[in-house]
Amino acid sequence: MSKGKLAGIIVLCIIVIIVVIVIVQCPPRCAPPPCPTDAISWHEAKNHIGERTTVYGTVVDATWASGSNGKPTFLNLGNPYPDQDRFTVVIWIGNRAKFPEPPEVYYHGKTIYVSGLIDSYEGVPQIEVTSPDQICEP
């Protein structure tokens, strides 16, 4: 057997071993859970203030208000700020570091599902997110 052919077999065996290790060490928990099927659309959220549920919509506007008190990140679904007919996801500075990427960059333009308690700030429904686990991408 030639050295080149032997080297190719060794590389192939190494790849197979790596794949097996990844599969064994990465059971189904590594795959993100599916998004809830009973979620409500962002424009329905105003009718569910005080309820703990999941809201979905496209992030059309996203800002990190780093100069504001509490340095919140705002992800606006449906319509951009300052439109009163929008849904806002709020991530306070104390929770921002839990996200692997800046939320205002990562989620902008994506459809997301956000779970939590719907409340209202100045007439706009919102959910305050404390963990990336509250946000699901289909």
Image: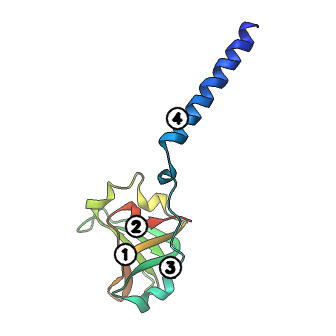
User: Counting other residues with Cα less than 10 Å from the Cα at mark 1, is it few (<14), some (14-19), or many (20 or more)?
Assistant: some
User: Counting other residues with Cα less than 10 Å from the Cα at mark 4, is it few (<14), some (14-19), or many (20 or more)?
Assistant: few
Query: 100 or 105, which is in the foreground?
Result: 100
Query: 19 or 79, which is in the foreground?
Result: 19
Task: Please say whether residue 81 is visible from this viewpoint.
Answer: no
The first of marks 3 and 4 along the sequence is 4
Q: Amino acid at mark 3?
A: Ala
The first of marks 2 and 1 along the sequence is 1
Q: Amino acid at mark 1?
A: Gly
Q: Secondary structure at mark 1?
A: strand
Which dot, 2 or 4, sits closer to the camera? Answer: 4
For label 3, the residue is 39
Tell me: 121 left or right of 56.
left
Q: Secondary structure at mark 3?
A: loop
In which quadrant is the C terminus drawn?
bottom right
Marking on residue 134: 2
| 14 vs 53: above or below | above
Residues at marks 3 and 1, CA–CA distance in whole angstroms: 11 Å
Q: Are dots 3 and 2 in contact, CB under 8 Å?
A: no
The residue most toward the right is 1
The first of marks 3 and 2 along the sequence is 3
Determine the residue positioned at 27% across, 68% down: 68
Q: Position of residue 84 (x, y in %)?
A: 43, 86
Tell me: 48 left or right of 96.
right
Q: Position of residue 109 (x, y in %)?
A: 55, 66
Q: Are dots 2 and 1 in contact, CB under 8 Å?
A: yes
Tell me: 38 left or right of 102.
right
The color scheme shown is: rainbow
Tell me: 47 left or right of 109.
left
Q: Position of residue 126 (x, y in %)?
A: 37, 79
Marking on residue 116: 1
Which dot, 3 or 4, sits closer to the camera? Answer: 4
